[in-house]
Amino acid sequence: MDSVSLSYLRAVRRKLHALAELSGEEYNTSAFIETELKRLGYKPKKIGTGMYCDVGKGGKRLAFRADFDALPIKENVDVTGCDFAAAGAVMHACGHDGHTANLLNVARIYSETPSPVPLRLIFQFGEEGIGGSEAMIEGGALDGVEEIYALHLCPELDDGKVGYCYGGMFAGCVEFDVNIVGRAAHCANPEAGADAVKTSLFAANAAFTAAEKHGMLINLGKIEGGAARNIIASSCKSNYSLRYFDSEKSEAVMLDIEHALLEADERFGTSHKLTAISVYPPLVNDALAVDKMRAVAGDAAVAVAPRNTAEDFSNYLLRVPGCMVWLGIGRDGCRSPLHSDTFKFDESSLLLGTELFVRLADIKAGKFKT
């Protein structure tokens, strides 16, 4: 990539970083992306705060996706040294500003040079917890798309490397709440009450047992209930996260938890409500798509292990073949983990990301020689 790409990447990424907005609230970020696409000559189609645009004419399209929401984290500028940090407690701590700057750079390149194949550039809102990919798909972002690719910044991977993974790369995730309603009474008269905390603990034990049995990871991140140490709790709420690579087994775990709750209600006189807050399927890369990505990455490609984190790019891969890869950004001073208040990277790391997408277009057109 030439110096124009780097100067563009740097300017756009820093603008996006300063605009950081939470999932579903990316109004200023969305307006910036839309304005930039129109400046480059495209006609973006809006879907919520997200959008997509097409490059070139023709049949089935090759798609690239970037996300642009931020996290409720206040940047530690004393460590990052960033003079373009967003105001308030919102930060691009997962690299989405880099993802979007990279895709806008691809748009810039093909506004000046015709794409060798029909492309679709997808700018997605709400990846962090509200499943924006589903809304994008329902809005037509995948209509006419033949295959799709995305990248994710990775501080654990050395700068200049591309991490690939065949099959399951990210875990599926079920975020769910368990609300228990009981009946308050003095602990000296337990028969007069219905203990919501006792039901919650019974269900928690069943949840951990079921997850262990099926080889899955579950976390009880928060539990709150009761009013005083000598009062039987009239309510209790628990917040869980289940991570999995086998959807059938995840359903079995959820059924075990529901059965335990029903049993506890009968034993302790409570009632319950189990609510799934969000469900992301596992991200499963297509083998042929990974082969193509390895081909365009060349010596930069390195195999990586699956992770128990979740990524809603998985929803696209349920519909069309494709893959996601890690783009290494790790170097001195740029090793802080994703979702940390000290996360940072150098925009020059994005140059390889742009090259990957351009080469994927070339390989689809039969122009890239491996």
Image (cartoon, rainbow, N blue to C red):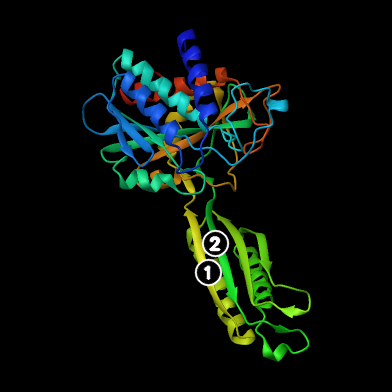
Viewer-nearest residue: 175 or 361: 175
Q: Can residue 296 be seen in this snapshot? A: no
| Number of callouts | 2
Amino acid under label 1? Leu
Q: CA distance from mark 1 to mark 2?
A: 7 Å
Which quadrant: the C terminus? Answer: top left
Q: Is residue 20 left or right of residue 28?
A: right
User: x, y (%) of residue 315?
Assistant: 41, 47
User: x, y (%) of residue 125?
Assistant: 43, 39
Viewer-nearest residue: 356 or 42: 42
What label does residue 176 carry, if any?
A: 2
Q: Which residue shows up at 60% across the image and 27% down it?
A: 85
Residue at the extreme left: 58
Label 1 secondary element: strand
User: Mark 1–mark 2 contact, CB under 8 Å?
Assistant: yes
Residue at the extreme top: 3
Q: Is residue 362 left or right of residue 68?
A: left
> Is residue 186 shown above or below 324?
below
* Residue, disc 1: 274
Task: Using a 10 Å C-alpha cutoff, classify the residue at mark 1 as few (fewer than 14 neighbours), some (14 to 19) or many (20 or more).
Answer: some
Amino acid under label 2? Phe
User: x, y (%) of residue 118?
Assistant: 27, 27
Dividing the picture into quadrants, the one containing residue 76 is top right
Task: Using a 10 Å C-alpha cutoff, classify the residue at mark 2 as few (fewer than 14 neighbours), some (14 to 19) or many (20 or more).
Answer: some
Q: Can residue 188 be seen in this snapshot? A: yes
